[in-house]
């Protein structure tokens, strides 16, 4: 059982995870449009990963006997600038999501909601990985700057990203 306040907060987070998925799909389309198939692939796999974040939280809300409330998803931008700018925006977004997860965890601690704390711990760990993955791409992007050859090499590496493994269902 979770509180109504927690139910509402988790539903808000479901919406934010949906937005993340939507944002990365829009970025994938943008990268494809500007001729960067590797960047497009990376964003497409990120979209798949965010979709798993959504359904994991959705399943938890239902499993707690609570109500899922699917809200309107904000429209993501159409333009994202240079490859470096795309990943700067990605990092900024992931830092925002980390803050949201931390707030949720703070609420679960305050409410002595141990089940939700355990559930959210997965997202806390995931956010560390998300930010680290983006930083690992930002570093070479900053190094190559405008060098087209360097950007093409990074694009080839990003083409290697494979679809995420399915996430274990929440008990
Ligand atoms: Fe769901 O982790 Fe990114 O946004």
Image (cartoon, rainbow, N blue to C red):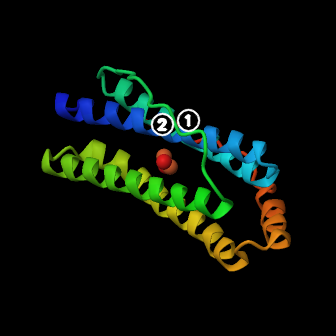
Residue drawn at the location 13% of the way across and 50% of the way down: 110
Count residues near mark 2 (Cα–Cα under 10 Å), then give few for <14, some for 14-19, many for 20+. Answer: many
Q: How many marks?
A: 2
Asked whether, in this view, residue 162 is left or right of residue 80, the answer is right
Asked whether, in this view, residue 154 is left or right of residue 3, the answer is right
Marks 1,2: beta carbons within 8 A: yes
Distance from disc 1 to disc 2, alpha carbons, whole Å, reads: 5 Å
The answer to whether 62 is drawn above or below residue 39 in the figure is: above
Question: According to the image, label 2 marks what residue?
Answer: 19
Where is residue 134 drawn, in percent x and y? 58, 63
Question: According to the image, label 1 marks what residue?
Answer: 22
The answer to whether 126 is drawn above or below residue 17 in the figure is: below
Count residues near mark 1 (Cα–Cα under 10 Å), then give few for <14, some for 14-19, many for 20+. Answer: some
Residue drawn at the location 42% of the way across and 51% of the way down: 123
Quadrant hosting residue 78: top right
Residue closest to the eye, 122 or 84: 84
Residue drawn at the location 66% of the way across and 48% of the way down: 43
Asked whether residue 168 is in view, the answer is: no
Outermost residue on the bottom side: it is 143
- In what quadrant of the picture does the C terminus appear? top left
Where is residue 34 drawn, in percent x and y? 77, 48
Helix, strand or loop at mark 1? helix
Asked whether residue 61 is in view, the answer is: yes
Residue closest to the eye, 58 or 155: 155
Where is residue 15 drawn, in percent x and y? 40, 32
Quadrant hosting residue 61: top left
- Residue 127's label in the rendered image is none
Helix, strand or loop at mark 2? helix
Where is residue 163 drawn, in percent x and y? 72, 45
């Amino acid at each position: 059982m979770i509180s109504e306040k927690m139910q509402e907060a988790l539903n808000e987070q479901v919406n934010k995870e949906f937005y993340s998925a939507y944002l990365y799909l829009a970025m994938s389309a943008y990268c494809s449009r500007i001729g960067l198939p590797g960047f497009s692939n990376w964003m497409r796999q990120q979209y798949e990963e965010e979709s798993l974040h959504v359904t994991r939280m959705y399943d938890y809300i239902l499993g707690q006997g609570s109500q899922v409330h699917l809200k309107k998803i904000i429209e993501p931008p159409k333009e994202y600038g240079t490859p470096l700018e795309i990943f700067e925006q990605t990092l900024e977004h992931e830092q925002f999501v980390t803050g949201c997860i931390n707030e949720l965890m703070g609420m679960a601690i305050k409410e002595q909601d141990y089940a939700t704390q355990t559930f959210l711990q997965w997202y806390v760990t995931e956010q560390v990985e998300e930010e680290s993955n983006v930083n690992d791409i930002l570093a070479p992007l900053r190094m190559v700057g405008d060098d087209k050859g360097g950007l093409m090499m990074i694009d080839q590496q990003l083409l290697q990203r494979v679809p995420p493994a399915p996430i274990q269902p929440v008990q």
